[in-house]
Image (cartoon, rainbow, N blue to C red):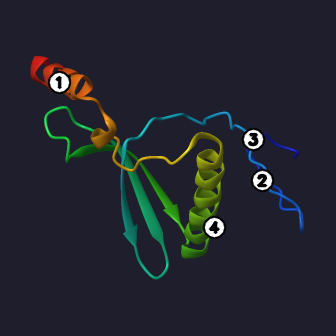
Amino acid sequence: MDQVGKVIIKPGGPITVEKGPNEVTYYANVVMVLMGPEEVVLRFGLRTDEDPLKGIGFAKIYLSPAHAKRLVTALKNGIEQVEGMFGEIAENPIPKLTTEQLQQLQQDQTEK
């Protein structure tokens, strides 16, 4: 790579992406996916304390459908590797919480 953040495609080789000078890091716990024939839009956000079914967006990423398909494959492969090492990832962790943990969550929510 001759520049930070620039991707150089090598035929048959892996692509690496280095941290760019303006790259920022976020945590998201909600994402909305919009799809069309020519683009896929991912809107990332954070759930609000007032309404857990509502999120406040902070980043919007546009992908081509081909890039989105490769992203799905990469995520699927990564999840399979993690589950192979640590066990199944629960899509909804709430049912796995103990009664005490659920009560603590409810108490924390009422205190806010």
- The residues tagged by marks 3 and 1 sit, at their Cα atoms, a distance apart of 44 Å
Question: Who is closer to the viewer here, 55 or 79?
Answer: 79
Disc count in the image? 4
Q: Which residue is mark 3?
A: 18
- Above or below, 32 relative to 58: below
Q: Residue at x 64, y 49 (%)?
A: 84
Nearest to viewer (mark 4 / mark 1): 1
Q: CA distance from mark 1 to mark 2?
A: 49 Å
Question: Does label 4 or label 2 sit earlier along the sequence?
Answer: 2
Q: CA distance from mark 4 to mark 2?
A: 17 Å
Question: Between residues 68 and 6, which one lies in front from this camera angle?
Answer: 68
* Amino acid type, residue under disc 2 in the picture: Val
Label 4 vs label 3, nearer the camera: 4
Other residues around mark 1 within 10 Å, as few (<14) / some (14–19) / many (≥20): few
Q: Is residue 18 left or right of residue 56?
A: right
Q: Earlier in the sequence, mark 1 or mark 2?
A: 2
The residue type indicated by label 1 comes to: Gln
Query: Which-is-in-front pick, marks 3 and 1?
Result: 1
Q: Secondary structure at mark 3?
A: loop
Circle 1 is placed at which residue position?
103
Question: How much space separates mark 4 and mark 3, taking CA atoms?
Answer: 19 Å
Q: Residue at x 73, y 44 (%)?
A: 5
